[in-house]
Amino acid sequence: QVRLVESGGGVVQSGTSLTLSCAASGFSFSNYAMHWVRQAPGKGLEWVALISSDGGDELYADSMKGRFTIYRDNSRNTLYLHMNSLGPDDTAVYYCANNGGSGYSKYFQFWGQGTLVTVSS
Amino acid sequence: SSELTQDPAVSVTLGQTVRITCQGDGLRTYYTSWYQQKPGQAPLLVVFGRSSRPSGIPDRFSCSTSGNTASLTITGTQAEDEADYYCSSRDSSGAHYVFGSGTKVTVL
């Protein structure tokens, strides 16, 4: 079955960098665009970034553009999120999800269990 | 801030029907998807597209759209449907994905 396992979260100091990973299995990873979505404690879901199936195209939420970089290694079935200049507002559970659908109907099909990033000031 | 607006909370009597709405300009162009999230768990896709459900999702979940408003309907609500529900789509430019602020469904 489809499995997405995030890792790399933890407690970091404000201003530092961190890279998250998402290991995928149970589906043809290289055929799917992939997302990162985050959720601050007690808050709603916030889309972070999307990368195309071949890694050639990236989209970012405006608040993350320039600080976060999404990339992937299809040979390792792994998605990454590199985050720079972290601040307390980046404290959240970070989820990876594969992109389902096409055209005007796209959705977050399967989700990992998430990895918690806590940024201390 | 979210470009999709949802009511914060709604309650429903066991076995009755509840409708959750989601408003946003992008919904005039792009389909909405809906996610269920229970405490301590990852979100789960429940409905997408015209009103498609992933394998394993009960047929009591359905969705529809009219203009800039999308709706998730749970018919014959069960106790296990108590959760937060989020809508998602793209913004009016199509360049970004967005989530609604979420609706907490309480089953009485």
Image (cartoon, rainbow, N blue to C red):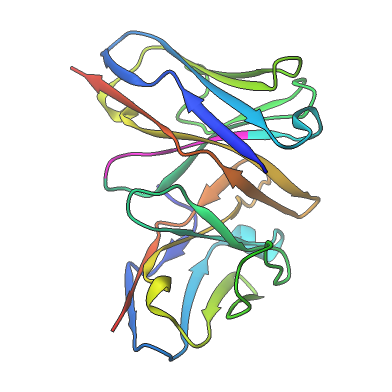
Instruction: State whether residue B91 appears in this view.
Output: yes
Q: Is residue B100 magenta?
A: no
Q: Is residue B90 above or below residue A31?
A: below
Instruction: State whether residue B95 appears in this view.
Output: no
Front-lying residue, B37 or A65: B37
Q: Quadrant of the rendered structure where residue A72 is? A: top right
Q: Which residues are magenta?
A: A35-41
Q: Is residue B43 above or below residue B27?
A: above
Residue positioned 32% across, 71% down in the render:
B9
Q: Position of residue A76 (x, y in %)?
A: 70, 16
Q: Position of residue A30 (x, y in %)?
A: 79, 27
Residue positioned 60% across, 25% down in the render:
A23
Q: State the residue lying farthest toward the top.
A: A16
Q: Position of residue A61 (x, y in %)?
A: 53, 33
Q: Is residue B39 above or below residue A57?
A: below
Q: Main secondary structure of the magenta part?
A: strand
Q: State the residue lying farthest toward the left.
A: A121
Horizontally, residue B18 falls left or right of residue B106, namely right
Q: Quadrant of the rendered structure where residue A46 is? A: top left
Residue positioned 77% across, 29% down in the render:
A53
Front-lying residue, A22 or B84: A22
Considering the image in quadrants, where does the C terminus of chain A appear?
Answer: top left
Front-lying residue, A76 or A83: A76
Horizontally, residue A44 falls left or right of residue B55, namely left
Q: How many marks?
A: 0
Considering the image in quadrants, where does the N terminus of chain A appear?
Answer: top right
